[in-house]
Amino acid sequence: TTDAKVSVTAAEVVLKNESYKIATTEENKIFYIEGYEALPLDFYSLNELGKTLLSVTASKKVVDNAENLSDFGFATDGGCYAKINVSYSDKTSFAFEVGNLSPNGEEYYCRSKDSKTIYLLDSSFVETVAAPSTSYLSRALFTAPDAENENDQVAVKSVTLGGSVPKDV
């Protein structure tokens, strides 16, 4: 979609190891990740993702009617690198899938959901829209004070890390 008045309201991202949904709040249109409301998020990166999903532009059409979708990374069981479903403010939506990295190493195969027409997408676009949910967690340890508010102070965040490291790391 290219209408300047249309915005992304939500997106569901399905990767091989996880799936997550981003949405905007009604009151201020800031993106968040559903289920991560209590975590510090990198709102700048989330909003950039929303802007990026306004336009999905292929660099080239590869084939109109692919006979063997698995050649491009679309398995017969529905498996692929990523599935992304975007909802827009005009109540429309667009779903697309990302397959394998192309031989040139700079683009990924993609298709509209359930289509046999294969296109190429720039790898930087794919890496943005198919990033893991944890890439949107804030890594900021403090926030600079507001220069226009003389009473504002540095906000130091307490960060506690937990979990386990996979055995193969």
Image (spheres, grey):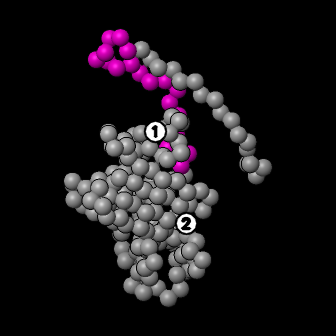
Residue assigned mark 1: 42
The answer to whether residue 148 is magenta is yes
Could you classify mark 1 by the number of other residues whose Cα lies within 10 Å: few (under 14), some (14-19), or many (20 or more)?
Answer: some
Q: What is the secondary structure assignment of the residue under circle 1?
A: loop
Decide: is 28 above or below 158.
below
Q: Distance between the residues labelled 1 and 2?
A: 24 Å
Q: Where is residue 87 in the image (x, y as percent from the top left)?
A: 36, 59
Q: Visible in this render: residue 104? A: no
**On screen, 40 above or below 8?**
above
Instruction: Tell me which amino acid carries mark 2.
Output: Tyr
Going from the N terminus, do you reach mark 1 or mark 2 first? Answer: 1
Residue under the point 31% across and 15% down: 149
Magenta span: 133-152
Q: Residue 55 falls in which quadrant of the image?
A: bottom left
In this orientation, which residue lies closer to the viewer: 79 or 119? 79
Label 2 crowd (10 A; few <14 / some 14-19 / many >=20):
many
Q: Which mark is residue 81?
A: 2
Does the rendering let one see residue 133?
A: yes
Most foreground residue, 111 or 77: 77
* Image x and y of residue 1, in percent: 28, 63
Is residue 120 placed above or below 2 in the rendered structure?
below
Point 52% across, 53% down: residue: 20
Give yes or no for residue 75 being in the magenta stretch: no
- Residue under the image location 76 percent in, 52 percent down: 168
Q: What element carries label 2?
A: loop
Residue drawn at the location 41% of the way across and 21% of the way down: 144
